[in-house]
Image: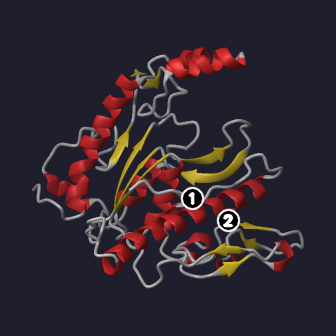
């Protein structure tokens, strides 16, 4: 299923606090919507004779780009407090702000924005219009799922991760300028303005591999060599996407998603109609972009993910 989610944040907001607040609220809505989709399918089993042929003990989420952020958060956030306080119970300060009176309040408030599963009805304050912000759907069904794969995503905070979380696979270019590979400040692509510190695939898998019991321990039962082992510190599940690297340096530093491509002829036609030069400019930055490169990476992604997905879901015994 290709799942949609609510959009809406202003990357051109005047202050970093405002940009962070809008982004974290948008990501929170994405988590609510992805979990609502899981419940939709469970409801279809119970109430609609399982018209989609779902096995609700084998549900996974894949996400690319923004979808990577959303599915990572959906896989790791345990409850509302998990978002705003760290493992020791102290506030995660980057997700709190001063509303203008010298106090400090969370950027996401459960009583206003709803719970992480979106099973509560909530409304904006009357001073902001009083409109409904969270509509409870498919209440009574579980939002749980069993596996997560992300491409170019990042996690809002490593405190969201816990030992015992589901298995995760990550594909990430180490030079990604938009989603930090380690931990760094996410910036607005068009302006370079800072938004919030996030943690990419490298630090996510460092955290996972630091637990007494590795959340990805089941991958070892596959009995296959890890094709990324030379570049992932032996952290099975992390796939550094080192496309067109020479001597450890990316030759196309603006290409952080080689599994994507766009049609040159169509874009050239748009350029001709509008007097722009998008196609030529982008091809200068990313000359190997195209279907052949993208499909090769899509094959790598499928080949790497499929056996790990199968083992994590108990769908196949590959040991």
Q: Closest to the observer: 279 or 200?
A: 279
The residue depicted at 30 percent of the width and 62 percent of the height is 214
Residue 285 can be seen in this image: yes
Q: Is residue 159 visible?
A: no
Task: Work out whether mark 2 precedes mark 1 in sequence or the reverse, and give the earlier one.
Answer: 2
Figure quadrant of residue 317: bottom left
Residue 182 x, y percent position in the rendering:
51, 46
What residue would you read off at disc 2? 95
Quadrant (top left, top right, bottom left, bottom right) of the C terminus:
bottom left
Which x, y percent locates residue 13? Answer: 80, 50
Image position of 195 (left or right of 224): right
Look at the picture and state if 198 lies above or below 120.
Answer: above
The scheme the figure's colours follow is: secondary structure
Q: Answer yes or no: do the residues labelled 2 and 1 have beta carbons within 8 Å?
A: yes
Q: Which mark is residue 156?
A: 1
For image coordinates 50% across by 62% down, the residue present is 73
Above or below, 295 against 39 in this view is: above
- Residue 1, image x, y percentages: 38, 56
Residue at position x 74%, y 42% from top?
Answer: 193
């Amino acid at each position: 299923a290709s799942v949609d989610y609510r959009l809406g944040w202003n990357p051109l907001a005047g202050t970093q606090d405002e940009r962070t607040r809008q982004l974290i609220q948008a990501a929170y809505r994405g988590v609510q919507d992805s979990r609502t989709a899981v419940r939709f399918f469970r409801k279809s089993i119970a109430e609609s004779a399982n018209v989609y042929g779902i096995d609700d003990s084998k549900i996974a989420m894949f996400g690319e780009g923004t979808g990577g952020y959303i599915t990572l958060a959906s896989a790791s956030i345990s409850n509302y407090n998990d978002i705003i306080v760290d493992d020791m119970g102290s506030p995660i300060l980057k997700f709190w702000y001063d509303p203008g009176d010298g106090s400090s309040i969370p950027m996401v408030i459960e009583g206003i924005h709803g719970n992480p599963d979106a099973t509560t009805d909530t409304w904006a304050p009357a001073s902001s219009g009083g409109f409904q912000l969270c509509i409870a759907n498919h209440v009574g069904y579980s939002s749980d799922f069993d596996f997560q794969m992300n491409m170019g995503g990042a996690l809002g905070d490593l405190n969201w991760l816990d030992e015992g979380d589901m298995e995760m696979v990550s594909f990430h270019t180490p030079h990604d300028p938009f989603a930090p590979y380690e931990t760094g400040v996410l910036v607005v692509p068009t302006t370079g303005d800072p938004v919030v510190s996030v943690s990419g695939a490298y630090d996510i898998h460092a955290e996972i591999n630091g637990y007494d019991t590795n959340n990805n321990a089941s991958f070892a039962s596959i009995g296959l060599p890890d094709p990324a082992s030379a570049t992932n510190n032996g952290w099975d599940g992390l796939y550094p996407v080192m496309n067109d690297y020479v001597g450890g340096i990316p030759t196309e530093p603006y290409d952080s998603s080689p599994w994507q491509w766009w049609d040159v002829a169509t874009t050239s036609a748009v350029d001709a109609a509008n007097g722009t030069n998008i196609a030529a400019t982008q091809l200068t930055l990313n000359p190997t972009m195209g279907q052949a490169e993208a499909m090769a990476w899509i094959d790598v992604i499928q080949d790497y993910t499929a056996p790990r997905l199968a083992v994590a879901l108990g769908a196949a015994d590959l040991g």
